[in-house]
Image (cartoon, helix red, strand yellow):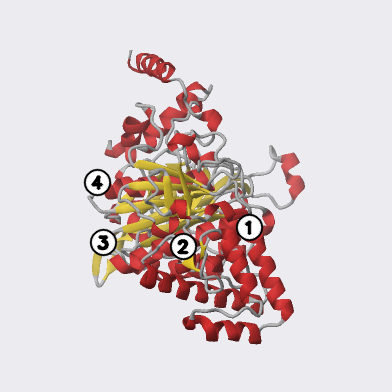
């Protein structure tokens, strides 16, 4: 086995400099070397007066062939009469030196393909005390890992994924990473909880179902075999048993349906009875300052300030209500002692009165109301009221029925959200407009951040997957939701809040989020995007390859591995849309028997 692992492919080239970070290989004429091949070389070096064996490991970054001996391009027509020699050169980036002496290898030293244990040394996996599978090598199908210490906060935190939409990169890979992190933590008996925002259609509402394309496609044998190579454990627990992402408990939440007399989930494809409905009581909407998440980066500073002042008054009224009336469903109405603020229309009417001359009867807010009336111009108040009016699309999200004691166990108050350990919570917001999405995402993020701040990052970790990150934390401007995402990026590690963020373009996302993401993953890119400074860690060769990368091809850049590595990720075994999910259980059982019979006889 060792002899097979050490297949010599050439020697270190002597006509180009070798350094501690890279070298060139003169490839043997009867051998083939590919991009992404892992290689190693040995050299006896004089270290402190003693001959010491040093091993250099690296990844092939580029390969080239040419003829030596040609003077002009037209000499190609006369090869039979011109003495030429074919040259085959490979360029290698060093990933590890063992022991770590920062000195170059010797020219002429033999170079071998790295397989098995030596491959794992090349990609830094042997130094990872905790690791999860990340993909397969494109050339040898060897397993490649991500160091969990640089995701969940032990040494670093957060993952950022970039790539063109629709190339099976961002969402599928991010969801799988979250699931594998939580599965690993379950084995270690560490408490984790997962939060996923489904921002496109109802695609992620079927992640608990197996993907029939894995078994029915003409490529099913290839898909299944790739998963076996990727992880025998994943294969046995999911593929062989035909399960979706169900080793952990998955809960699904959706907004309330607008046209229904009863409160039911606004979903078209997933079963209503299997989906909880989320909303707020007016009290939690006011107490938690949810209204501020209606602010966008484009709003003027005056409008932002006015909405924040309204937020502060609602918080004061919520505290007043809890103290005086012991009520956490509605809020006392300071302009009408006979009626409480319980629904969106009540909040809207409250803002109208706030901008009028009607005097409030609650002493605690009288000065604040006067300041608002004196401080802001009519045009600012009008612009603010238009913003309040624009959130009328979540009118049916607010009401006493979301108090949690209504007897309906499928109704969830986002103001009192309980995150269970070992559960992935999927919040469907794909049917909402942009403002409503911002309000829901901001509310949930702030609640999670507050809970983790109270409980401490050591008690539990919360992993958040959020796609379309540039919508919530754009590069320019300020807003409350952007601030909380930046806060998670900067302080989340200490509080056990981990962000797996995804977007098409990293240059459109807050620099603080990109800079604080320890692990960066890139899929197929456009030529305009790939040249931005956010991808400066990529080599020229990798940038060119990402322009035409196929679905499931990604580049992973992580601390501890000195060069980015391209991997392939197998076709998802869980359903990514309704039409991929199994519905007939009897058919599923019959097909399992047929597959096992054909595979094992």
Q: Which image quarter is the N terminus in?
A: top left
Instruction: For the residues labelled 3 and 1, say whether their Cβ atoms are less than 8 Å apart.
Output: no
Q: Which mark is residue 459?
A: 3
Query: CA gap, disc 3 to disc 1?
Result: 38 Å
| Label 1: few (<14), some (14–19) or many (≥20) C-alpha neighbours in 10 Å | some
First reached walking from the N terminus: tag 3 or tag 4: 4
- Disc on the earlier residue, 3 or 2: 2
Q: Is residue 66 visible?
A: yes
**Residue at the front extreme?**
338
Q: Is residue 140 above or below residue 283?
A: above
Residue 248 in percent (x, y) is at 33, 41
As drawn, the label of residue 330 is 2
Q: Nearer the viewer, residue 116 or 424?
A: 424
Whole-number angstrom distance, CA of label 3 to CA of label 2: 33 Å
Q: Is residue 572 visible?
A: no
Q: Nearer the viewer, residue 249 or 401?
A: 401
Q: Position of residue 331 (x, y in %)?
A: 47, 66
Looking at the image, residue 115 sits to the left or right of residue 394; the answer is: left
The residue that mark 1 highlights is 392
Q: Could you say which disc has been placed on residue 187 in the image?
A: 4
Question: Which numbered mark, 4 or 2, is in the foreground of this view?
Answer: 2
**Disc 3, disc 4: CB below 8 Å?**
no
Mark 3 residue element? loop
Mark 1: which secondary structure? helix
Q: Earlier in the sequence, mark 4 or mark 1?
A: 4
What's the distance in space between the residues labelled 1 and 2, CA to CA? 18 Å
Residue drawn at (27%, 53%) of the image: 191
- Mark nearest the camera among 3 and 4 is 3
Pick the front one: 256 or 432: 256
Which mark sits nearer the N-terminus, 1 or 2?
2
- Residue 218 marker: none
The one of 259 and 293 positioned closer to us in this rendering: 259
């Amino acid at each position: 086995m060792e002899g097979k692992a050490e297949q010599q492919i050439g020697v270190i080239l002597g006509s180009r400099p070798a350094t501690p970070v890279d070298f060139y290989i003169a490839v043997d004429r009867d051998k083939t070397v590919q991009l992404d091949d892992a290689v190693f070389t040995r050299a006896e070096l004089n270290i402190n007066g003693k001959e010491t064996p040093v091993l250099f490991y690296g990844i092939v970054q580029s390969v080239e062939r040419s003829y030596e001996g040609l003077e002009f391009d037209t000499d190609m027509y006369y090869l039979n009469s011109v003495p030429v020699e074919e040259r085959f050169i490979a360029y290698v980036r060093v990933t590890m030196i063992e022991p770590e002496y920062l000195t170059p290898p010797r020219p002429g030293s033999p170079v071998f393909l790295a397989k098995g244990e030596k491959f794992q040394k090349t990609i830094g996996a042997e130094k990872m005390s905790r690791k999860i599978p990340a993909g397969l090598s494109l050339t040898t199908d060897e397993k490649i890992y991500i160091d969990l210490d640089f995701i969940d906060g032990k040494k670093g935190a957060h993952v950022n994924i970039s790539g063109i939409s629709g190339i099976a990169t961002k969402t599928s890979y991010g969801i799988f990473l979250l699931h594998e992190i939580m599965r690993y933590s379950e084995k270690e008996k560490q408490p984790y909880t997962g939060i996923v925002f489904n921002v496109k259609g109802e695609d992620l509402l079927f992640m608990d179902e197996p993907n029939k394309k894995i078994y029915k496609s003409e490529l099913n044998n290839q898909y299944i075999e790739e998963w076996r190579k990727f992880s025998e454990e994943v294969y046995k627990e999911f593929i062989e048993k035909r399960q979706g992402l169900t080793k952990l408990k998955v809960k699904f939440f959706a907004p309330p349906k607008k046209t229904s007399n009863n409160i039911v989930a606004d979903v078209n494809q997933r079963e209503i009875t299997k989906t909880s409905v989320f909303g707020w009581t007016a009290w939690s909407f006011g107490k938690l300052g949810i209204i501020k998440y209606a602010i966008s980066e484009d709003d003027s500073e005056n409008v932002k300030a006015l909405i924040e002042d309204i937020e502060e008054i609602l918080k004061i009224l919520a505290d007043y209500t809890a103290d005086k009336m012991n009520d956490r469903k509605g809020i006392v109405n300071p302009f009408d002692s006979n009626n409480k603020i319980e629904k969106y229309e009540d909040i809207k009417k409250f803002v109208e009165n706030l901008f009028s001359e009607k005097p409030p009867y609650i002493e605690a807010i009288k000065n604040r109301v006067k300041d608002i009336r004196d401080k802001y111009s009519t045009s600012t108040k009008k612009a603010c009221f238009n913003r309040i009016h624009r959130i009328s699309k979540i009118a049916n999200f607010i009401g006493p029925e979301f108090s949690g004691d209504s007897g309906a166990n499928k109704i969830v108050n986002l103001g009192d959200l309980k995150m269970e350990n070992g559960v992935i919570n999927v919040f469907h917001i794909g049917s909402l407009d942009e403002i409503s999405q911002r309000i829901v995402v901001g509310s949930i993020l702030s609640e999670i951040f507050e809970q983790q701040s109270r409980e401490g990052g050591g008690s539990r970790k919360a992993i958040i997957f959020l796609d379309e990150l540039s919508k919530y934390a754009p590069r320019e401007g300020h807003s409350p939701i952007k601030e909380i995402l930046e806060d998670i990026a900067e302080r989340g590690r200490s509080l056990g809040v981990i962000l797996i963020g995804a977007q098409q373009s990293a240059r459109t996302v807050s620099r603080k989020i990109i800079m604080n993401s320890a692990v960066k993953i890139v899929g197929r890119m456009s030529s305009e995007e790939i040249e931005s400074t956010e991808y400066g860690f990529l080599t020229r060769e990798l940038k060119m390859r990402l322009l035409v990368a196929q679905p499931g091809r990604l580049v992973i850049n992580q601390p501890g591995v000195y060069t980015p590595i391209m991997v392939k990720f197998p076709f998802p075994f869980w359903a990514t849309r309704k039409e991929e999910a199994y519905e007939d259980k009897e058919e599923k059982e019959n097909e399992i028997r047929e597959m096992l019979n054909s595979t094992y006889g």
